[in-house]
Amino acid sequence: MLKTYTKFPLDLPPDKTHPIHGTEGVVWVPTLKVRVAKLKAHVQTMRFDVVVDSGSPCCLFKTDLADFLGIDLKSGEVDSMGGVVQGITEPVYFHKVRIFVESDWVIEVKAGFMKKLSVNGILGRNGFFDKFQVRFDHSVTPHQFEITKIERPQ
């Protein structure tokens, strides 16, 4: 499946330019549409955009999704996670969920739920990149990426 990056507005004052993105006022990000469901339950979220992020160690979602799905956050395995800036961390609670990726694939992953996640969700290395081949292409404008599910014998 070939996808075009999604355009997100940058929060810049009107008279400023961004050091990387200039005056365009947007950043292009690889995203996919997903729905998330609790295992062994019929409740699932509406479709929403998540970031495809090879820099993230795992799949992550906001805690609001866990609340909506009826997942008891504190019953999951807890760890802490930070970003590219050292020192600031936040608790992350891991639970097994089912993710419906676009309209083509369903995967089960152990995903983390964080309160202060800056986006609705992230598809990371453990849980997503170990199930899909992803090829990013920045030679075209707007950028594109291609995903293919890895078929493994059962």
Image: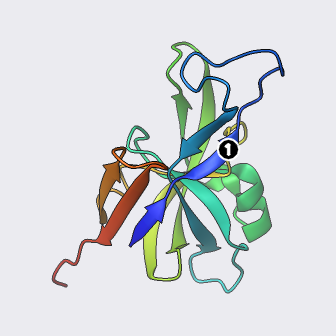
Q: Position of residue 96 (x, y in %)?
A: 51, 65
Horizontal relation, residue 40 to residue 30: left or right? right
- Residue 113 appears anywhere in the view: no
- Residue drawn at x 53%, y 75% is 102
Q: Position of residue 53 (x, y in %)?
A: 45, 45
- Residue drawn at x 40%, y 42% is 57
Residue toward you, 83 or 79: 83
Q: Position of residue 31 (x, y in %)?
A: 54, 56
Q: Residue furthest left?
A: 153
Q: Amino acid at mark 1?
A: Phe
Q: Quadrant of the C terminus?
A: bottom left
Q: Is residue 58 above or below residue 154?
A: above
- Residue drawn at x 62%, y 35% is 91
Residue toward you, 61 or 30: 30
Horizontal relation, residue 30 to residue 43: left or right? left
Q: Can you tell which quarter of the image residue 41 is in?
A: bottom right
Q: Can you tell which quarter of the image residue 87 is in?
A: top right
Horizontal relation, residue 59 to residue 66: left or right? left
Q: Residue furthest right?
A: 14
- Residue 117 appears anywhere in the view: yes
Q: Which residue is mark 1?
A: 8
- Colour pattern: rainbow
